[in-house]
């Protein structure tokens, strides 16, 4: 058993007091910053728990976990005791700040800590007033000690048990905080029809174990068809009114009311959903588990639609459902992955294609249910996915650290904005009322008959912005070819700052608009009236431009995925491992680096052009160093060189904080905590890339030899 350095306190771990003191400093700083008073008004479980209580619990439990984690050889009682000490220190730290309120005048305390508000009488002090503050502090310390002990006890559970409990609690908190944005996403009737179809197709395919993919899909189609027929009968007979039992107390169904001919549409739709359920029985583990977790969340959102708030019933349902899902879904995923691994390469390709189509279909129908706010958040997430995929080429594949990536993003945005708005480049110097334009003085010295080349549409300017960003990135790469590591990062950081300064400079104001930016930038328009007079679409809101983001994400992911497996991708990985060895093996470093700079910058320009059209304007404050840091952080957390990792990292670091924007003051705090935790627990990223081995691509003799032909060992 470990002891302290002096061997005097044998019941305490060697680092228990040190970690507890670290936690005390953090807790005191956060408390003085006003975190409890700011979070006090945000309910997590209606009428029961507010966010300030959740924060206190998280502080005590996490400190207990950190203290107990290094004590691997200690018995359970000793671990719980040390964790309780950590929770005790957290309680004492908050109590210390509460005592300051009784010693220092309130106005003086607020003068130094402007966001701080009194805690006496709050939930953190258990509602006790100043006259009985001792009772409140005692309750606070006892509660924190108990929570710390629970953190130590949690560490004694098996890994699967820890995942179940933490997933259930995290799901409760997240859904409670987001209830206003997500409670109307899916109705109970729609969710029930989808879930029954999926489970029916999955169960039938599992039961009969059909080997043929076609027959397996057909076996799943039949139960889905039955659900669709029943749903069509209910819709046709008109019982889904506001007081109908089949609405289960929720809103009016969306999917069940989409078609004018439900007897034809709904059976086919839910039959396809049943086929997807059957397909999941032999899908890759990631696809299997991912879709089933989406189904579980859909069920929870349907329950939330009936409750309309995170009440006691909803909290228990969320915890139990997520805990059960975390227990069963990975086990079923292993079975599905084993079947997927056992089929031939041709069948795997078919499964992958069908899985991709399923994912694409979900992405395409998402705006129908999510609403403008959530869709707008998804647009921002996909923007960062595009940039993350591009920066992954530089950092993840080629090993070139770029901290000035925002420069390419800005160049793409400004190029698109300049080409689609009146400027000296597009409209020239002889335009009526030229004196009212900011670029009028640029016409001095330019031929008076210069008329420009005309305003471009978004679709014409988009590829030009991508090309300009790529060329600029390659131009940056030329003078830094010999730099590596930190030196390269500093140079690229300087390039990003130079770009930011130029966009705000007075000398470039006639063209770039300086602090006023460029407005209004036209939004993308799809004009197919020549084919059909009704086919005119304006991408003027979050839901419509969402599809442009989806296309761009798919394009970026496909291009980088193909490049990663090509000769160029192997050259990037060789260069990342060791430039000198790669050069000795014949890798042309100059060309390989320039291609990495150019391709990476091109994707930043791709996202920048869409960003300009979405905002209808470009402003320099949108292109700060924080953008580069965010993109770099999400690919590190997701996994360097991993496209699924980029997607997951963008949802965690961009999507989740954006949804909780009302907690604006502490978004960066949560961002930093997630970054530290991910780096400590998953240094390779949450979804690290698979190790590529060329030997795995060689087919075994049994699979590559025609039937009836025997290959002797050692034959050439």
Image: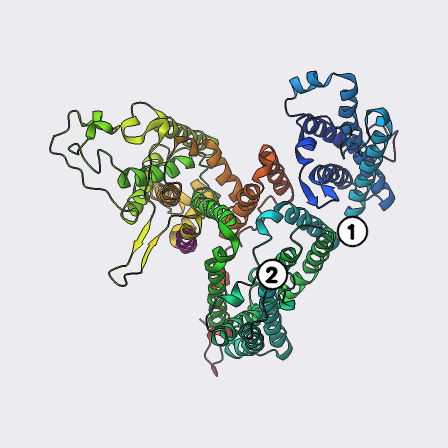
For the residue pair 506 and 598, the one nearer the viewer reads as 506
Residue stretch rendered in magenta on the structure: 547-566
Q: On the picture, is 509 further left or further right than 185?
A: left
Crowd around label 1: few <14 · some 14–19 · many ≥20 (10 Å):
few
Q: Is residue 240 magenta?
A: no
Which residue is the site of mark 1? 157
Image quadrant where residue 143 sits: top right
Split into 4 quadrants, where in the image is the N terminus? top right
Q: Nearer the viewer, residue 64 or 276?
A: 276
Q: CA distance from mark 1 to mark 2?
A: 23 Å
Seen from the viewer's position, the closer of residues 2 and 294 is 294
Magenta span dominant secondary structure: helix
Instruction: Count residues near mark 2 (Cα–Cα under 10 Å), then give few for <14, some for 14-19, many for 20+.
Output: many
Quarter in which the C terminus is drawn? bottom left
Compared to 590, does 504 lie above or below? above
Q: Position of residue 56 (x, y in %)?
A: 74, 36
Residue 454 at x, y percent in the picture? 20, 42
Give the colouring mode of the picture: rainbow
Give the residue drawn at x 68%, y 57%: 326
Pointer 2 residue: 289
Q: Nearer the viewer, residue 700 or 166?
A: 166
Q: Is residue 574 visible?
A: no
Residue contact between numbered discs 1 and 2, judged by CB atoms under 8 Å: no
Can residue 48 be seen at all in this image of the molecule?
yes
Indicate the position of residue 275 as horizontal and vertical percent values.
53, 73
Query: Does residue 448 appear left or right of residue 277 in this picture?
Result: left
Horizontally, is 443 left or right of 104 in the view? left
Residue 434 bears which disc, if any? none
Q: Secondary structure at mark 2?
A: helix
Find out whether residue 554 is within the magenta segment.
yes
Give the foreground label among 1 and 2: 2
Which structural element holds mark 1?
Answer: loop
């Amino acid at each position: 058993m470990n002891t302290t350095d002096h061997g005097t306190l044998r019941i305490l771990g060697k680092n228990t007091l040190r970690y507890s003191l670290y936690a005390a400093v953090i807790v005191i700083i956060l408390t003085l910053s006003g975190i409890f008073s700011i979070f006090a008004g945000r309910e997590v479980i209606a009428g029961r728990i507010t966010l300030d209580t959740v924060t206190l619990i998280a502080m005590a439990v996490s400190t207990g976990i950190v203290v107990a984690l290094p004590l691997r050889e200690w018995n359970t009682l000793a671990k719980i005791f040390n964790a309780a000490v950590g929770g005790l220190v957290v309680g004492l730290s908050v109590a210390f700040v509460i005592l300051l309120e009784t010693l220092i005048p309130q106005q003086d305390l607020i003068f130094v800590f402007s966001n701080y508000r009194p805690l006496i009488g709050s939930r953190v002090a258990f509602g006790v007033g100043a006259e009985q503050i001792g009772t409140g502090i005692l309750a606070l310390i006892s509660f924190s000690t108990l929570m710390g002990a629970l953190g130590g006890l949690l560490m004694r559970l098996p890994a699967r048990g820890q995942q179940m409990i933490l997933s259930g609690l995290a799901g409760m908190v997240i859904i409670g905080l987001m209830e206003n944005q997500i409670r109307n996403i899916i109705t109970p009737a729609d969710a029930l029809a989808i879930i029954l179809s999926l489970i029916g197709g999955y169960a039938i395919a599992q039961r009969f174990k059909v080997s043929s993919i076609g027959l397996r899909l057909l076996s799943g189609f039949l139960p889905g068809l039955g659900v669709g027929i029943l749903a069509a009968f209910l819709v046709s007979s008109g019982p889904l009114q506001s007081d109908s039992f089949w609405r289960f107390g929720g809103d009016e169904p969306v999917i069940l009311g989409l078609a004018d001919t439900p007897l034809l549409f709904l059976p086919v739709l839910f039959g396809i959903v049943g086929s997807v359920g059957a397909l999941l029985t032999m899908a890759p583990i990631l696809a299997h588990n991912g879709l089933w977790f989406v189904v579980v969340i859909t069920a929870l959102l349907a329950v939330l639609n009936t409750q309309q708030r995170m009440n006691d019933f909803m909290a228990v349902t969320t915890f139990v459902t997520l805990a059960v899902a975390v227990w069963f879904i990975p086990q079923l995923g292993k079975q599905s992955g084993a079947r997927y691994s056992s089929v031939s390469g041709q069948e795997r390709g078919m499964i992958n294609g069908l899985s991709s189509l399923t994912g694409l279909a979900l992405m395409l129908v998402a705006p129908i249910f999510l609403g403008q706010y959530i869709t707008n958040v998804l647009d921002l997430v996909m923007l960062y996915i595009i940039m993350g995929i591009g920066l992954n080429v530089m950092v993840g594949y080629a090993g070139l650290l770029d901290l000035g990536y925002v420069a390419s993003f800005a160049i793409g945005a400004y190029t698109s904005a300049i080409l689609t708005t009146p400027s000296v480049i597009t409209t020239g110097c002889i335009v009526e009322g030229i004196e009212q334009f900011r670029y009028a003085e640029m016409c001095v010295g330019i031929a008076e008959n210069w008329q420009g080349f005309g305003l471009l549409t978004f679709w014409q300017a988009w590829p030009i912005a991508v090309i300009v960003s790529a060329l600029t990135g390659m131009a940056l790469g030329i003078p830094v070819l010999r730099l590596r590591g930190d030196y390269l990062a500093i140079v690229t950081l300087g390039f990003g700052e130079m770009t930011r300064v130029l966009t705000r400079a007075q000398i470039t104001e006639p063209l770039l608009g300086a602090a006023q930016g460029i407005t209004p930038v036209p939004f993308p328009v799809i004009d197919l009236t020549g084919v059909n007079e009704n086919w005119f679409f304006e991408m003027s809101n979050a839901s419509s431009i969402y599809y442009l983001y989806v296309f761009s994400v798919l394009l970026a992911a496909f291009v980088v995925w193909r490049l990663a497996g090509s000769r160029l991708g192997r050259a990037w990985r060789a260069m990342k491992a060791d430039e000198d060895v790669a050069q000795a093996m014949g890798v042309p470093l100059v060309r390989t680096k320039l291609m990495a700079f150019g391709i990476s910058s091109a994707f930043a320009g791709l996202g920048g052009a869409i960003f300009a059209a979405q905002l209808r304007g470009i402003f320099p404050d949108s292109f700060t160093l924080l953008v580069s840091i965010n993109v770099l952080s999400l690919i590190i957390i997701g996994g360097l060189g991993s496209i699924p990792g980029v997607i997951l990292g963008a949802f965690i670091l961009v999507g989740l904080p954006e949804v909780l924007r009302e907690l604006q003051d502490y978004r960066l705090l949560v961002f930093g905590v997630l970054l530290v935790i991910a780096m400590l627990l998953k240094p390779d990223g949450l979804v690290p890339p698979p190790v590529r081995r060329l030997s795995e691509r060689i087919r075994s003799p049994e699979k590559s030899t025609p039937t009836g032909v025997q290959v002797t060992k050692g034959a050439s």
